[in-house]
Image: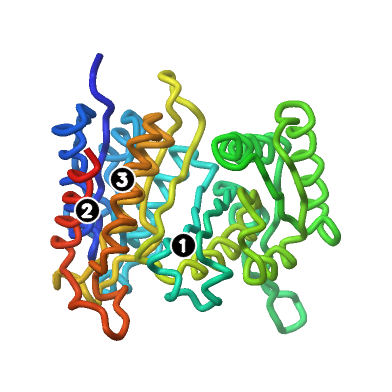
Amino acid sequence: MSNPSLLILPGDGIGPEVMDQVTRIIDWFGEKRGLKFDVETDLVGGAAYDKHGVPLADETMARALEVDAVLLGAVGGPKYDDLDFSVKPERGLLRLRKEMDLYSNLRPAQCFDALADFSSLKKDIVAGLDIMIVRELTSGVYFGEPRGIQDDNEGGRVGVNTQRYTTNEIRRVARSAFELAKRRNNKVCSMEKANVMESGILWREEVIWVHENEYPEVELSHMYADNGAMQLVRAPKQFDVIVTDNLFGDILSDCAAMLTGSLGMLPSASLGAPAANGRPKALYEPVHGSAPDITGQGKANPSACILSFAMALRYSFDQGEEATRLENAVQSVLASGVRTADLMQAGDKDPVSTTEMGDAVLAALDASL
């Protein structure tokens, strides 16, 4: 049998720096755990524009559709601010999501004990936090038609966006959330605005249908999305898996992200339908951006990118134990006081570089054997 295949797209800014550390960890799993991958590297975002004049070449897109998983670093930067919207670096990422049909966006919000003091909330509220937000990613108000800005014939203008969901679009992301819950604590909370939006009524009804007909063993609750935002900052540990639409998921996942204290620690996964081999189409990327202000300085925190690879191990390659091994290695490094500059507090040791953080994670992996 051939090895699982990975397409690595480092991208722009700090993307190549953090992805270099992930590549070292991929090599470690091949050498020390017999878990080998066939790895290819290509361009996306501004790097692709500089070479090809587009943020994602057709050949790269075709390969992304063929491999078992795509790992992406970051895209964008001030160098590209004046480009036409159609060729901005972010369009490369959006094309990947659209053409791979990555409808289920997984955004974990996990607060490592060593970083609980970094949260803006009290330590006892966030310590030990481990929740997963499942955001529908390819429909809803960001994609619905009609949309646009037009004159209103009264001397002003009107902006229109359409919130639209179908039965299939809701059911498939609900299934993704229920499947995740079965691997975790068996609880799903569905969030919408069924009190004021017809799309919210349909959302609730279809999630209930999936629950009753396919996942009755999973506990299901419902919450209006505005109350959900309040509950995330009041008592976040009441949740296990949250499933919600594209707009509310965008807002709620960013809210949950700050519970953990640092964007440099947050991975994500975007999953689609299973391919012929049973693996879902998948794109894994850190939540942080390209951070042009620290690019090339060796200051970037590679943890979110490393943890994104851990998500790939778990959700694309059914290697849950190895994913946990990698997550525990990152946690042990943080607990030992080894930190990049974004995680420093008064009295801490001097910050380590991006490469030194990678060194520490590899040493922790060695110690786990």
Name the residue type under label 2.
Answer: Val
Gap in angstroms between the C-alphas marked 1 and 3:
16 Å
Mark 1 or mark 3: which comes first in sequence?
A: 1
Q: Residue at x 70, y 73 (%)?
A: 158
| Residue behind mark 3 | 326
Q: Is residue 344 above or below residue 263?
A: below
**167 vs 248: above or below:** above
- Is label 1 in a helix, a strand or a loop? loop
Q: Which callout, 2 or 1, points at the residue further toward the start of the chain?
A: 1
Q: CA distance from mark 2 to mark 3?
A: 8 Å
The quadrant of the picture occupied by the N terminus is top left
In this rendered view, identify the residue nearer to me: 223 or 88: 223
x and y percentages locating residue 42 in the rendered image: 20, 44
- Nearer to the camera, 349 or 135: 349
Front residue of this view, candidates 225 and 181: 181
Question: Is 91 rendered above or below residue 337?
Answer: above
Q: Amino acid at mark 1?
A: Cys
Name the image colouring. rainbow
Disc 2, disc 3: CB below 8 Å?
Answer: yes
Q: Residue furthest right?
A: 195
Which residue matches tag 2? 361
User: Is 175 left or right of 316, judged from the image as shown?
Assistant: right
Q: Residues within 10 Å of mark 2 (few under 14, many from 20)?
A: many
Mark with earlier residue (2, 3)? 3
Quadrant including the C terminus: top left
- Name the residue beneath numbered marker 1: 111
- Quadrant in the rendering for residue 194: bottom right
